Amino acid sequence: MKNDLLHQRECFNRRAENYYRTRNGDKQLLLRDLMYGELLKDVKIEKEKILVLEPMCGYGEGKRILETHFGNRICYEGFDYSDEIVKYAKEYLGDINVYVQDVTTFSSNKKYDVIIIMGGGSSCGIAWAAGRTEYVRAA
Ligand SMILES: C[S@@+](CC[C@H](N)C(=O)[O-])C[C@H]1O[C@@H](n2cnc3c(N)ncnc32)[C@H](O)[C@@H]1O
């Protein structure tokens, strides 16, 4: 299991630059905006500022997606186990709270308002809590 994780992480490290470039192509961006626009169109969180966690965040695009489709201000935190990807995220997205962390060993005492997990192409998942009710939505 540990070797599998290491092997997988090396693959993501090697693909970091290419992954960043292809993910930011016009058609890719348009597809994700349409998809998340539909997924989030009736979601309202009654707080001015929300605490967001994006595990396996890649380049931290969850921040842009939520800023685009939610009206709330976003206090963002993301992590990824690929140090190369985290380096790119910081280099290209500027002052973003992204750090190196393996999701299988992650724990936190914080209460996040939204946890977003995005797939590389066409899959996505979002979980959010409003008061005591929890929601999960995936596409
Ligand atoms: C398919 S990509 C999706 C990245 C990003 N969410 C996106 O939509 O662009 C999967 C990401 O998860 C990261 N990842 C895979 N396994 C992980 C683990 N065990 N812990 C943390 N990150 C992991 C990879 O480094 C990669 O950046």
Image (cartoon, rainbow, N blue to C red):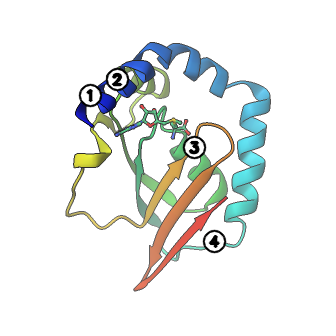
Q: Amino acid at mark 1?
A: Asn
Ligand 1 is within 8 Å of the C-beta of the residue at disc 3: yes
Residue on which the image places disc 4: 43
Residue 7 circle label: 2
Considering the image in quadrants, where does the N terminus appear? top left
Q: Amino acid at mark 3?
A: Gly
Q: Tell me: residue 97, above or below residue 73.
A: above
Q: Would you call the spot at circle 2 few (<14 residues within 10 Å), some (14-19), or many (20 or more)?
A: few
- Element under label 4? loop
- Tags 3 and 4 in contact by the CB under 8 Å rule? no
Q: Earlier in the sequence, mark 3 or mark 2?
A: 2
Q: Position of residue 36 (x, y in %)?
A: 69, 54
- Element under label 1? helix
Ligand 1 is within 8 Å of the C-beta of the residue at disc 4: no
Q: Position of residue 80 (x, y in %)?
A: 36, 36
Residue on which the image places disc 1: 3
Q: Amino acid at mark 4?
A: Val
Q: Residue at x 39, y 36 (%)?
A: 96
Question: Viewer-nearest of labels 3 and 2?
Answer: 2
- Spatial separation of the CA atoms under disc 1 and disc 3: 23 Å
Q: Residue at x 43, y 20 (%)?
A: 11
In this rendered view, identify the residue nearer to me: 115 or 120.
120
- Element under label 2? helix
Residue on which the image places disc 3: 119
Q: Earlier in the sequence, mark 2 or mark 4?
A: 2
Q: Position of residue 71 (x, y in %)?
A: 61, 62
Q: Earlier in the sequence, mark 4 or mark 1?
A: 1
Q: Residue at x 52, y 14 (%)?
A: 17
Question: Image quarter for residue 107?
Answer: bottom left
Q: Tell me: residue 20, above or below residue 132.
A: above
- Element under label 3? loop
